[in-house]
Amino acid sequence: MESELSTELSIAEAERLDDLVQVVEQGMATFIQVGRALGEIQQSRLYRETHDTFDVFCTQRFGFGASRARQLIGVSGVVDNLVENGKPLQPLPVNSAQAAMLVKCPADVAIKAWEHAVNTADVNTDGEPIITAKHVKGAVESVMGNGAPPPPPPPVPGRSKDRLGRIVEPALEGPYKENASLVDAVRKLQSAKAAALMVADRTGGEWVETPEMTRLFELLESTLKFAWYHTTCPDCRGDVGKDCETCNGYGYINRSTYNRLTDEQRSWLNPL
């Protein structure tokens, strides 16, 4: 039974309700903030002055019922759990569909399942994990069924592919794998950025200069991505150590160098 509260909101409560409603209506860029706003409205019963129930309030004010609201509240709680108790600097869910697969899991299982999903996901051309809701669901089933997630399959030697989809030459497998540390650094940086933005959204966060912080994170990310392995050097053709002006003897080039190649140089780089 709900506690006895006056249906009339105090001035502070009314102002807080206006702020929270604005968050939900505008989206504020992330599902996490929407879930938190809805959770506070429900928990504090800030709807009580105009509506009898949270369900009716959501339906009439936002166009969705309490079921969808509870889902958003749940997924924001999942992300908060991952930030506070999960593996440091791992990527976080970027949409509600990913996090929704973890809502019904105990907190410790959700952490293990998300870590398994991140570790076993394919990556896109920017080195970022491709995590679908289906993939997260499979990770949950794996953790719940086995008690511990199986390790990701080991890479097949000599079958790595670069940003153009070309198979990495055997001589460049070593540099390619070493370069993967930069990809991992970018992932950690993106996770740190997401966690920092979440802190900025909490009490006291008004002291955080969010635009400047975002700018610095993006600068660091672009600096790291500048050094990423893009593809084999078309001039020395992967001959590591050779005196080559295009790649400086590395055998591979970054995206910036690739963008400056002539059509003749690129012609050799047709996917194998």
Image (cartoon, helix red, strand yellow):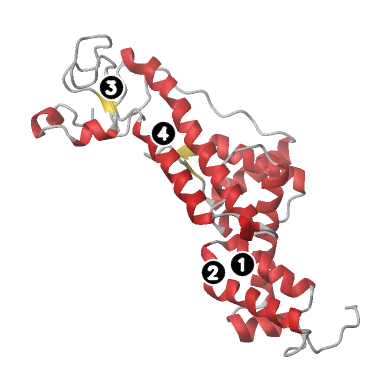
Ranked by sequence position, the earlier of labels 1 and 4 is 1
Name which residue type carries label 2: Gly
Labelled pair 2, 3 in contact (Cβ < 8 Å):
no
The three-letter code of the residue at mark 4 reads Leu
217 vs 149, nearest the viewer: 217
Residue at the spot of label 4? 224
| Direction from residue 244 to residue 5 in the image, left or right | right
Query: Looking at the image, is 37 positioned above or below residue 249?
Result: below
- Rendered image: mark on residue 252: 3
- Residue 215 location in percent, x, y? 45, 49
Residue at position x 72%, y 68% in the image: 39
Residue type (three-letter) at the residue carrying disc 1: Val
What is the spatial separation of the Cα atoms under label 2 and label 3, in whole angstroms?
A: 43 Å
- Distance between the Cα atoms at labels 3 and 4? 16 Å
- Judge depth for marks 4 and 2 and give the one in front: 4
Dot 3 or dot 4, earlier in sequence: 4
Percent x, y of residue 110: 70, 46
Q: How far apart are marks 2 and 1 (CA)?
A: 6 Å
Q: Nearer the viewer, residue 252 or 260?
A: 260
Residue at x-position 8% and y-position 30%: 264
Q: Distance between the residues labelled 4 and 2?
A: 31 Å
Closer to the camera: disc 1 or disc 4? Answer: 4
- Could you tell which of marks 3 and 1 lies nearer the N-terminus? 1
Residue designated by label 1: 34
Question: Going by the image, does 254 lie left or right of 141?
Answer: left
Q: Residue 149 carries which label?
A: none
* Label 2 crowd (10 A; few <14 / some 14-19 / many >=20): some
In the rendered structure, the answer to whether residue 184 lies left or right of residue 88 reads left
Give the residue pinned by disc 2: 27
Res. 263 image quadrant? top left
- Say whether marks 2 and 1 touch (CB < 8 Å): yes
